[in-house]
Image (cartoon, grey):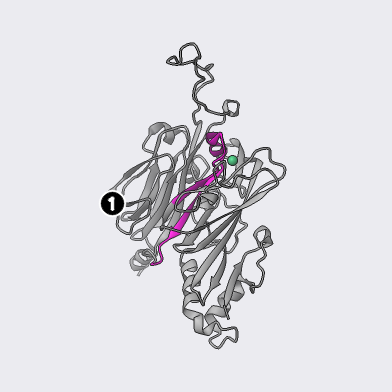
Amino acid sequence: MNQNIKIFGVGMISLIIFTGLSNYPLNEIYAQASNDKNNKNGIKENRGYIENVIQYDTDKNCSKDLDKIPNATEYLTYFNCGHVNIDADNEKTSREFTLVVEENNTIPISNQGHQFKAWTYNGTIPGPTMRMTEGDLVKITVINAGENNFTHSLHTHSIHPGKSDGVEGPGGTIVPGQNFTYTFTANPYGVYPYHCHVNPIADHINRGLYGMFIIDPKEPREQMQEYAMLMNGYDMNYELEGPVTIPAVDKKDPTKFIAEEEEGERSNEIYTVNGKAFEYMDNPIRLNQGEDYRIYLVNMLEFDLVNSFHLHGSMFDYIASGTGEEPEYKNDIVTLSQGDRGIIEFKAELTGNYMFHAHQTEFTDLGWMGFFNVAESKDNTDDEDT
Ligand SMILES: [Cu+2]
């Protein structure tokens, strides 16, 4: 008999019901896997695989609250690993995620009072960081809320079938009031953006329909404190929205270019990491001296060609796209084009306050800047006290 284990969160996502399988609340499944060595339900003989999956999710800091709406500081460590279904006999894990698209969601984008007329996945910009392991069967159900006005979709980077590509045509676009489940096997491991891919794409992205997901390698990376950082911007000139098309053909002379009426350049007024300008200047991220840190970094900035991440006071290893184990280089700046991403790893060597920001002064001045506050580790403090 197949022993299937499901880990359920609460609220909205629990609406997904599976048939023919047993459902267990999260706490119960942890208890079953860790305590009951003679479990009648057949867990014992399959203990290794189930325990491994649960332990790995725990090590990844997977949230037990899949309905959480994290603020910009909570976003750093909020990892949504979905509802987990473990088939121990076949050593297969599947994960189910739900993203609800809302168009009427005005959200704060600075601590000074700026608000943005956002379109969101699950209520935040960026949307939740979804996390899975290489080889997992992933099902992401996107619900386009009935009160919305526009069609939306979910386009994930990485490998997936065309019917789950989230583009207009055959790829699963969703009209208001409908939903679609995008299905793929998580492969290869790495860090990836996801975003709506409905035209005009720049508008759907600018309004906030994007996020990141992490496919972890089967063999875990070295364990350390991990943060998600997604770089973005906001063009608050909503009146400039609309389709971008190639110029009309001049029938008299097709070699000519018919200029469109000048509508003004799209550009960002505010830049951030994790959605809120200067968030980590106002609330510095506390690090401990001597400890290692990993940042999953994604650039979803629209309208500007490149963005960058610069760290003061340290050098970091950089793994492009997160698709390898070994860093490509060591630097204190990484420059990323639209949609590009990677993994930063560094040790907090020295105590003090260290800026991190875009190495483009304009972006920094307009919100993309924060601080790490490296404190003496507790061990060192204890040593000095004694
Ligand atoms: Cu959209």
Report the residue at 47% width, 32% height from top.
303
Residue 182: tell me if it is visible.
Answer: yes
* Closer to us: 353 or 325: 325
Judge whether 49 appears above or below 101 on screen.
below
Q: Secondary structure at mark 1?
A: loop
Which segment is the magenta one? 192-219
Tell me the residue that label 1 is attached to.
328
Relative image position of residue 85 (x, y in whole percent): 57, 69
Relative image position of residue 58 (x, y in whole percent): 49, 68
The residue most toward the right is: 147
Amino acid, disc 1: Glu
Relative image position of residue 137 (x, y in whole percent): 52, 62
Disc 1 crowd rating (10 Å Cα; few below 14, some 14-19, many 20+) is few
Dividing the image into 4 quarters, which one contains the C terminus? bottom left
Side of 10 relative to 338 (left or right): right
Report the residue at 52% width, 51% height from top.
73
Residue 283: tell me if it is visible.
Answer: no
212 within the magenta span: yes
Report the number of discs.
Answer: 1
Relative image position of residue 109 (x, y in whole percent): 56, 39
Judge whether 165 appears above or below 233 on screen.
below
Q: Quadrant of ligand 1?
A: top right
